[in-house]
Amino acid sequence: MIPSMTSSFPMASKTFLLLSCLTILFPISSLSSKLNLWPQPTSISWPTPAAIPLSPSFTITPNFSSHIYLHRAITRYTRLILSERHRPIIPPVVNLSSSSLSTLYLSISDLSAPLQPGVDESYHLYISTSGASLTAVTPWGAMRGLETFSQLVWGHQPVVPIGMRIFDKPLFTHRGLLLDTSRNFYSVRSILRTIRAMSYNKMNVFHWHITDSQSFPIVLPSEPELAAKGSYGSSMSYSTRDVKRIIQYGLSHGVRVVPEIDMPGHTASWAEAYPDIVTCANRFWAPTGKPALAAEPGTGELNPLHAKTYQVVQNVLRDLSTLFLDQYLHAGADEVNTACWETDPAVARFISAGGTHDQLLEKFINMTHPYIADTLNRTAVYWEDVLLGPYVKVQPASLPTESTILQTWNNRAKNTKQIVQAGYRVIVSSSDFYYLDCGHGGWVGNDSRYDVQEAEPSNELFNDPGGNGGSWCAPYKSWQRVYDYDILHNLTKEEAKRVVGGEVALWSEQADETVLDAKLWPRTSAAAEVLWSGNKDSEGRKRYSEATDRLNEWRYRLVRRGIQAEPIQPLWCVLHPGMCNLEQ
């Protein structure tokens, strides 16, 4: 029995050089035969801790000749497997075979299956002294299996477990990450890196919240002025070529790209090109003594009574459906502000004549939803507000369940249950668990609430412990908070069938690409495992204690792979498993 591969090797970063030194200087509390995979597979069997060296000429051999995206993945994983030379913080103790493994045989039964909602991502992986095989129904399941195989490899002279069988498939078909590129800009390179990190974590939906009130950064062929005047500048916009590059990169990593153009609210950026179709544009968002005109700075909403609104909107939606391949098209519809609408004389007359705000939103939805669903043949995704909004909403008749998915972000399980009981499919993104921007304090300026020197009264906490410090969704969502979320909480089995999955979200008021990796990872990894294989063991108990050690290991591996994930504990805790627990 040997602790495998403890020899030194070139490190990709100072972090790992330091880690190597600390492993020698500090006693490790125990060596382990445990392997660290993330996300945890559905079923894994490894009865005897043994491993086999990889041959320097190791190859992945498919049973097919052509699939552009899977061939790219095979090339990528072959290079990663042979070059990564991952050194676990606590190396597994194994019997080492005297032979070597030269080939992973890959077999796909449905090579033509497209990357679409509900696609089969299951795979079987078997590794023995005589060979290794990976079988999957689709290329996308094969990509998940290749990721698992890559995580099984470790050591300066790479080895891989033998006598191992894995069967794996996701609990949820929709495992997403939302990135807001309107409030602050993200380069194509940073988006591609995020998609790569998603594939490492077996996530499959990049929800691209492209536009909002602050900027309109995507160049659309039919409406080029929206980006020309509504973006932060030509160097901070996405060309058709950029979009196609991101989509193709996503396909090569098994990640769908779902676009969102938020409307009719959150559209101040449209006013630079079309001031006539946007109400309350460029006004102060919170006038003294009057209702706020927006949820945050950046005022402007599309006018549902202006005919030109629908000409522009249809051009935008048509261009999106041409550029983006996915079945889902997200059309926003959250946080519509009635006071903003009422600044328009035509809207004010409509309300004075007995019209309602609900009727205004219904007019907009009735003019745009059929275009998305019928003309463009896409599934329309909206934020829950369109049906459950506290101030303005539509009747279910405007939202056919067969062509509509709602995304929930408020009131935890209560709203999820309301939506599925109404017959809709739902994507869960509870701000109490999955909003990764929360807990960083406020960002609006000229705010006197911070200028408090004495202890605050217990019923007026803001800066002191218990206050939100200006962050409406405080506190910060730690990885434990993300990991322990049950998106099916309080649902019946029938209701749970309508939950297609979940998404974590990074809104970018206080984020850009300089902090992107640390804001996302490894907290998004926590959601990735829960959405892939759950957060409970075979006896139904939450496995957050066991997950801590694995996530520590996974975080260091992500850093080694070029993802600057933030640490979740001091390194001492990693080297002394269990010693940093709250409960023994």
Image (cartoon, rainbow, N blue to C red):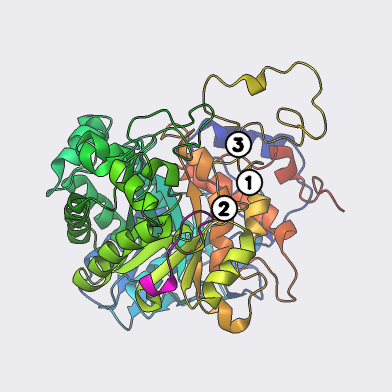
Determine the residue positioned at 21% across, 40% down. Answer: 276
Give me the residue at 67% from left, 58% from top.
547
Upstream in sequence: badge 2 or badge 1: 2
Instruction: Name the residue that disc number 2 marks.
Output: 434
Tag 2: amino acid = Tyr
CA–CA distance in space, label 2 to label 1: 7 Å
Q: Residues within 10 Å of mark 3 (few under 14, many from 20)?
A: some
- Residue 365 in the magenta stretch? The answer is no
- Mark 3 belongs to which amino acid? Ser
Q: Is residue 481 visible?
A: yes
In the picture shown, does residue 443 fall above or below 541? Answer: above
Q: Which mark is residue 477?
A: 1
Magenta span contains residue 394: yes
Q: Which is the main secondary structure of the residues drawn in magenta? A: loop
Q: Quadrant of residue 327?
A: bottom left
- Residue at x 56%, y 37% (from the top left corner): 16
Dot 3 or dot 2, earlier in sequence: 2
